[in-house]
Amino acid sequence: MQRVPFASFEPVLLERLEALWGRPVNLYRCLANQPQLAAAWTEFFQALRAESRTPRALRELMILRSAQLAGSEYEWAQHLKMARKAGVREAQIDALARWRGSAEFDARERACLELQEAVVAGRVGDEVYAECARHFGHGEYVELTLTAAAYVMVPRVLEALRVPLDDDIRDHAPRLD
């Protein structure tokens, strides 16, 4: 059961959300109970999505993997659309839970998925960093690390608030596997 009600947005925040992403999704409608933090969250996640130098498809693979590991149906459903739009292939989506044994992922994608899993586990070892450093510069590594950490937080927030699936995906939510 949903733990906080959907709240009305302050006009400036609603205008910003609509300009960025269209109609605010349920997560933002719950976050609107604390307008200042909802605004800060919006800008942080906009920066991760649109101001990063690393390819969006890499980051969406990481987000989908985080959703799988957390069992977050909401995060999976929201980012599946984004991943497809960013160019993540259906074969990669289908193989994501078994990425280590799949030929669908190149070395850069594997490094990102390994980083995501390490961040989820709370231990990023030197081997994980070294593999990322083979493919990415320091700024890119920071982006990928922030992406990994942010999308460990999102499913936890979704669970703590018990944010329900949005109407447009509730009846046909994609599989989480």
Image (cartoon, rainbow, N blue to C red):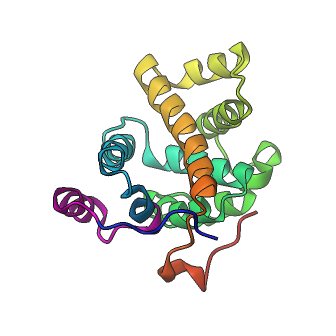
Q: x and y percent of residue 116 in the render?
A: 64, 37
Q: Residue furthest right?
A: 101
Residue 137 against residue 45 in the figure, above or below: above
**Residue in the picture at 77% in, 53% down:** 97
User: 100 and 10: which one is in front?
Assistant: 10
Q: x and y percent of residue 166 in the render?
A: 50, 75
Drawn side of residue 101 relative to residue 165, left or right: right
Drawn side of residue 125 relative to residue 88, left or right: right
**Residue in the picture at 50% in, 38% down:** 147
Drawn side of residue 91 relative to residue 148, left or right: right
**Number of callouts:** 0
Residue 8 lies in the magenta-colored region: no
Q: x and y percent of residue 135 in the render?
A: 54, 25
**Residue in the picture at 36% in, 58% down:** 32
**Residue in the picture at 30% in, 67% down:** 8
Q: The magenta stretch spans which residues?
A: 9-27
